[in-house]
Image (cartoon, rainbow, N blue to C red):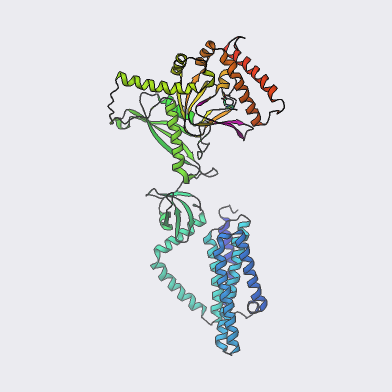
Amino acid sequence: MLNRASWKPAAAFGLWLLLCPAALWAAEPPPRTLLDRFAFSEMGVLSLIAGTVLTAVLVRRFAPKKRVHVRRTVILLLLYICTLGAGAVLTRFEAGGAADTIRTISDLLATLTVINLGAIAIFDLALPALSIEIATIVIDIVTGIAYIIVLLAGARRWGLDFSSVLATSAVVTAILALSLQATLGNILGGVALQLDKSIRVGDWIQLEPSGRQGRVREIRWRHTVLETRDWDTIIVPNATLLAANILILGKREGEPTQHRMKIHFNVDFRYNPVDVIAAVDAAFAGSLPEGVAAVPAPNCVCLDFAGQGRDSFAHYQLRYWLTDLARDDVVNSRVRARLFAALRRANVPLAVPAAQLFVENDDVDRRERKRRREIERRMHALHSVGFFQPLTEAELEDLSGTLQYAPFAPGETITKQGAVAHFLYILAEGTVEVRVRVDEAEARPVRTLHAPTFFGEMGLMTGEPRSATVVAVSDVDCYRLDKSAFKKILAERPQIASDISALLAERRMEIEEAIGDADGDARKTRMDLEQNRILNTIRDFFGLGGDADR
Ligand code: CMP
């Protein structure tokens, strides 16, 4: 039984066997028959021209990259027509011998044109239409054999001794083989590479020992052409390519092409690796930066403690799988930005090399100035939250002490629809998008929020699951307020619950409108009902009792 890999070489061999009797026939003195009559009839000339035009049109439409083959055929056709004309002129002037030679050349050219048209029809049009891919080298060999047969037939007509031609060519071949050993090595390498399909056009490969990487653009007879990410082209002789191990990047049988990338970072010993890993893994558990594969998921590992016993930090590695190998730097940068934000959110600083010494005059005044600056930033964020208006400056300052700083990188999911709500988010800087899931495949944008504003209040105040997903559009600085701090405020200012219930009802209506569930006419009535429902839910959730709206 032929398996998938072996049937194409077997087919080429079969074709060769078919061509052998044709070669024997060609070796006999050929009767000037069918082909002659065809080549020298008006019908023949017109058919060849029509066939070439039709082939050119089909190639232009279905295989534009193969136009060079048509060009070659047109040149042969033009030469054929010229020799026909020359033959006719010579016959008229009764130059018998020369006319005969030109006639034979015409004959040859007509046959070569037919062979080329046939090769284009089979290899460039028919087989690709059936999704059968044949290596360029196999096509070249088959066409070359057909040429040789025709040339042998021509040689017989000129009266050349076939056996002496063969003997001479064997000697010439031996001499050439000796002198062109390197070139032949490359050519055989090219044949091997194309036939066994170990490398394909489009694969990313790494050259050893230089480590240079490039995408295979073309495998030629003598060399392989690689394009690098730096917009350069590398020409690798095929023999060199085969002499070393070839590393094909991101390729695994039956799996999508994706390559593992590693990002190294160091964190001081004082931080527990379990916490560091959890913080990084969580940042990549939801939506992923563009260009990062979902399976296998990105993961973080602690690789080593104290490199060479000198460092005071542990060495970590974040691994992810890159889907488009041409865009490694861009995606790496996105992943690094998200990693950085995740560490800052978890209050885990990147390690400072032990050899570096920062001398800082950290006196009491300076520390106080730093603290005041941070409080001002937080107060500014709190003032942007409309429903905190009733609070006094002292109450807001108290509240600012309970806020947790939470930065996010572009593309990161901040809250996920359906998740349990733990925080209210105050957006101090940046832009986020609120999206709602319509079905498994589609999430629709509901609104874009710009700093300063807040979000995440619906889940925190009602205890209901998050109503929407909020994603960072730009670099985002948030402050988180947790439920206990919020409960304290509500206990002191219960009217906040009724102030905010209108906003919550409005936001919920917008979500329903985005999903397409809203009933336009009854909007006002539904808003009132929704506001009441939300108010009661907040009261129940925080145990406020019925006088909350005073
Ligand atoms: P929560 O349901 O806790 O989590 C998702 C958040 O998205 C939600 O709170 C609101 O803060 C916010 N959100 C939902 N719908 C809207 C909207 N229409 N306009 C602005 N923000 C919204």
**Drawn side of residue 22 relative to residue 198, left or right:** right
**Drawn side of residue 107 relative to residue 364, left or right:** right
Identify the residue shown where x is 65% and y is 17%: 533
Verify whether residue 346 appears in magenta.
Answer: no
Q: Nearer the viewer, residue 348 or 445?
A: 445
Q: Nearer the viewer, residue 212 or 494?
A: 494
Q: Nearer the viewer, residue 26 or 451?
A: 451
Quarter of the image where the C terminus is located: top right
Residue 319: percent from left, percent from top: 45, 36
Whether residue 262 appears in this view of the structure is: yes
Identify the residue shown where x is 31% and y is 31%: 353
Residue 325: percent from left, percent from top: 48, 45
Residue 504: percent from left, percent from top: 60, 22
Q: Main secondary structure of the magenta part?
A: strand
Quick check: which quadrant has ligand 1?
top right
Q: Which residues are magenta?
A: 433-453
**Drawn side of residue 169 relative to residue 546, left or right:** left
Q: Is residue 206 above or below residue 162?
A: above
Q: Is residue 459 above or below residue 308?
A: above
